[in-house]
């Protein structure tokens, strides 16, 4: 039976300790970078004053430069989850969401129905919610395919594109296509690539009219002073960003090699996580949990298991040693 307590999202370490015991857990249940931006703890933060609006705009400008779009089209939000739900409420109507994908995509628009990648043409002319790279399978669409999907929205549909994991794939992003004349909304995450998910910082990229409506919904001080200070400096750290993109690809390749050696077929192009398929994903989850290794099962796909990057050679060796041979 699939362990449903851990199928909602990754990161349930407290529940894992309470259920399975042990303290020395290896958490592979999320797609969060195990190598966080190293200057967060030393970044000055004014904890006494309210977040400064000019500093917020400077942070949005730094983020826009990283994304490749104009800052007028960027709105900071307290996490991508909030951005998805707010934009979904503002653009509420009928449409489709790609399946399988984030649970939030199924909930952000009341009139949205699931559609498979092989049937996207059935959504022509309507709003479509999809992620690139997709989660959990890591499917990555190139720009030509995405531009075709955008063109097929017609005059009434929107493309709501979740690029939460796009920092490792800058050439596949459509951020530079966001403007007032396109029915395109993009969501970007800070915490996943920069390894600082607890900061709760994300962005909505959209036409200026929608950005204004989002700001009105968010009100004053939409994100914390810490998010503004750390986000600004991190997005300006081009040396770290470029080096991390290379490092993640290299570490994902090492994880792939270990999985293949154990007989598992690996799915996904996103370097922050991999998806494997086995006879019983729930049983494999339980086996690894008994070795204090937390992974991500899926209630609707009982043969799937998603794995984040171990973060070190020792952690990778520990995971591979605990992984049973497949086939």
Image: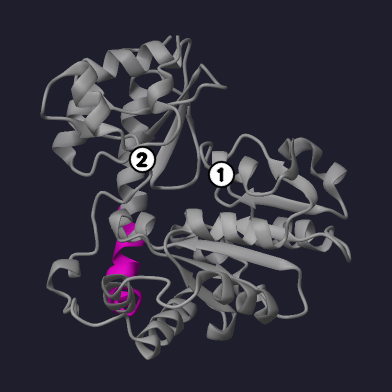
Q: Which label was assigned to residue 256?
A: none
Question: x, y (%) of residue 121?
Answer: 85, 45
Q: Image quarter for residue 246?
A: bottom left
- Residue at 29 percent across and 65 percent down: it is 243
Q: In which quarter of the image is the C terminus?
A: top left
Question: x, y (%) of residue 131?
Answer: 59, 50
Q: What stretch is highlighted in magenta?
A: 233-247
80 left or right, relative to 200: right
Judged from the image, the secondary structure of the residue bearing numbered disc 2 is loop
| Res. 288 visible in picture | yes
* Residue 300 is one of the magenta-drawn residues: no
- Residue at 58 percent across and 54 percent down: it is 85
- Vertical comparison of 257 with 67: above or below: above
Q: Mark 2 points at which residue?
A: 30
Question: x, y (%) of residue 48?
Answer: 18, 80
- Vertical comparison of 169 with 235: above or below: above
- Colour mode of the rendering: one colour
């Amino acid at each position: 039976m699939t362990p449903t307590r851990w199928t909602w999202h990754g990161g349930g370490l407290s529940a894992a300790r309470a259920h399975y015991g042990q303290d020395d857990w290896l958490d592979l249940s999320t797609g969060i970078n195990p190598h966080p931006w190293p200057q967060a703890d030393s970044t000055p933060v004014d904890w006494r004053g309210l977040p400064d609006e000019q500093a917020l705009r400077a942070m949005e400008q730094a983020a826009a430069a990283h994304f490749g779009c104009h800052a007028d089209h960027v709105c900071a939000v307290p996490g991508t989850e909030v951005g998805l739900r707010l934009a979904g409420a503002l653009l509420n109507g009928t449409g489709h969401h790609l399946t399988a994908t984030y649970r939030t995509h199924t909930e952000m628009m009341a009139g949205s129905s699931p559609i498979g990648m092989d049937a996207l043409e059935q959504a022509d002319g309507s709003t479509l919610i999809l992620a690139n790279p997709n989660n959990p399978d890591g499917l990555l669409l190139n720009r030509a395919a995405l531009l075709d999907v955008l063109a097929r929205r017609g005059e009434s549909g929107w493309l709501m594109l979740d690029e939460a994991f796009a920092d490792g794939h800058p050439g596949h992003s459509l951020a530079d296509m966001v403007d007032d004349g396109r029915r395109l909304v993009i969501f970007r995450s800070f915490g996943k690539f920069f390894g600082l998910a607890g900061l709760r910082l994300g962005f909505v990229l959209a036409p200026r009219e929608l950005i204004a409506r989002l700001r009105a919904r968010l009100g004053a001080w939409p994100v914390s002073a810490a998010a503004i200070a750390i986000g600004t400096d991190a997005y300006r750290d081009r040396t770290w960003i470029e080096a991390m993109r290379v490092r993640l690809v290299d570490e994902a390749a090492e994880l792939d090699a270990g999985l293949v050696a154990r007989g598992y077929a690996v799915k996904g192009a996103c370097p922050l996580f991999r998806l494997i398929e086995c006879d019983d994903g729930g049983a494999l989850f339980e086996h690894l949990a008994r070795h204090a290794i937390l992974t991500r099962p899926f209630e609707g796909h009982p043969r799937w298991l998603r794995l984040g990057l171990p973060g070190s050679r020792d952690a990778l060796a520990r995971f591979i040693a605990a992984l049973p041979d497949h086939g």
